[in-house]
């Protein structure tokens, strides 16, 4: 099915606002909404997280009486559960809305380990949340879609939510929409420079998506190992707090968080908490390409934001913002001797190697290797 067919059908439901967080399963839908879809749906907002999108849908209904469409990856259901159950559910305010959910980790399909459990519980979660749903796949016809949306209309009439669960490969492929930013520094090169800068007892927490994959490969290439790095393969936006508590407990070791701008944006309140109660041995790196690259490259909706300025205002003791290899090298040299919590924003281009690999170990194996390294490095102060 073409993405524009779904968008037109959504409009016919009386929906004037589409909002959400991009997902790779929904890439063609998201690309269409970010380009030609602007001429079909009058209001499109990429939010910081899925719960915020639910909030916009509630505001849309309160102000216009019309339901909104909220899109997300199924992992985003976790972020959406609170506003759905505490506000939108028919037992509370009864706010109708259409949810378009990309189904990662669908049982019986191959996917990344972080999607396996959520894939199994996606449909049970929707039933538990009292949200009726239809499942769209590559074989879904326009007539079947029309049937799903009639069900959605019936749910709206009862002040309920309805979900379209989208299987991988549902949308007809077309020439990809490519978003570019104004930066030229290669992200993997920047990651490699940071990895090469590490001390033997340094500990790294890397965020979900391609940053963790690049950190894994660069660590193997530069250091010959990767057990210095905890790969936060899921739970987008939470790497910084994992790194923060690690730094508070491992006070004799420097902890580096390799974060992304979309992840920082998703749970930006963490900056305020860390700034108020700083960990002097933490270096928080934000690799900022102004896009959700790991799920298709759609802009975050907050392009041009200086996360360094926000970190400074939140109370980080040292703040840097660089956009060149030379600037990054100079900043890393200065940070080496600092004893205060530091934020380093690195503005990078969009793009990655086509042959970028994935971790060979399981998540549990990564956890065990990292914990062993963290303990031994802390005891000896050098590579064991």
Image (cartoon, rainbow, N blue to C red):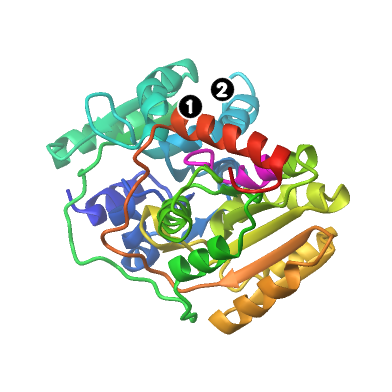
Q: Read off the residue under disc 1.
A: 160
Residue pictured at 64% horizontal, 36% vertical:
376
Q: Is residue 241 magenta?
A: yes
Residue 260 disc label: none
Mark 1, Cα crowd under 10 Å, few <14 / some 14-19 / many 20+, is many
Does 307 sit left or right of 278 as displayed? left
Magenta residues? 231-243
Residue pictured at 65% horizontal, 51% vertical:
202
Q: Is residue 256 magenta?
A: no
Name the spot of residue 302 as percent of width and height, x first: 58, 65
Q: Secondary structure at mark 2?
A: loop
Q: Are marks 2 and 1 in contact (CB under 8 Å)?
A: yes
Q: CA distance from mark 2 to mark 1?
A: 6 Å
Name the spot of residue 221 as percent of width and height, x first: 40, 59
Residue 230 sits above or below residue 284 on the image: above
Residue 149 sits above or below residue 303 on the image: above
Name the spot of residue 2 as percent of width and height, x first: 19, 53
Q: In the rendered view of the protein, which quadrant contains the C terminus?
A: top right
Residue pictured at 40% horizontal, 55% vertical:
217
Residue 362 vs residue 181, the one in the foreground:
362
């Amino acid at each position: 099915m073409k993405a524009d067919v779904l968008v037109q059908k959504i409009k016919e439901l009386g929906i004037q606002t589409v909002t959400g967080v991009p997902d790779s399963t929904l890439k063609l839908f998201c690309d269409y909404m970010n380009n030609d879809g602007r001429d079909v749906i009058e209001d499109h907002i990429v939010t910081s997280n899925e719960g915020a999108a639910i909030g916009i849908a509630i505001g849309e209904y309160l102000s216009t009486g019309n339901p909104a469409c909220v899109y997300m990856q199924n992992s985003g259901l976790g972020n959406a559960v609170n506003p759905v159950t505490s506000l939108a559910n028919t037992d509370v305010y009864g706010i109708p809305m259409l949810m378009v959910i990309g189904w990662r980790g669908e049982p019986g399909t191959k996917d990344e380990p972080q999607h396996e459990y959520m894939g199994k519980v996606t449909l049970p979660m929707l039933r538990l949340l009292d949200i009726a749903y239809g499942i769209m796949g590559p074989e879904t016809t326009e007539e079947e879609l029309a049937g799903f949306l009639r069900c959605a209309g019936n749910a709206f009439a009862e002040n309920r939510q309805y979900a379209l669960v989208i299987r991988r490969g549902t949308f007809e492929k077309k020439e990809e929409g490519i978003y570019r930013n104004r930066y030229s520094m290669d992200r993997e090169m920047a990651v490699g420079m940071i990895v090469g800068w590490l001390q033997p007892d340094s500990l790294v927490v890397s965020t979900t998506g391609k940053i963790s994959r690049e950190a894994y490969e660069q660590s193997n290439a530069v250091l010959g190992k990767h057990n210095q790095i905890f790969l936060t393969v899921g739970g987008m936006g939470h790497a910084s707090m994992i790194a923060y508590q690690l730094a508070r407990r491992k006070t004799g070791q420097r902890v580096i968080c390799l974060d992304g701008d979309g992840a920082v944006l998703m749970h930006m309140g963490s900056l305020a908490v860390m700034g108020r109660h700083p960990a002097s041995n933490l270096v928080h790196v934000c690799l900022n390409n102004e896009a959700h690259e790991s799920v298709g490259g759609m802009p975050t909706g907050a392009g041009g934001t200086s996360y360094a300025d926000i970190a400074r205002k939140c109370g980080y003791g040292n703040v840097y913002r660089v956009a060149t290899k030379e600037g990054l090298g100079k900043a890393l040299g200065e940070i080496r001797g600092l004893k205060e919590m530091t934020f380093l924003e690195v503005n990078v281009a969009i793009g990655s190697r086509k042959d970028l690999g994935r971790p060979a170990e399981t998540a549990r194996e990564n956890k065990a290797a990292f914990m062993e390294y963290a303990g031994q490095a802390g005891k000896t102060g050098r590579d064991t």
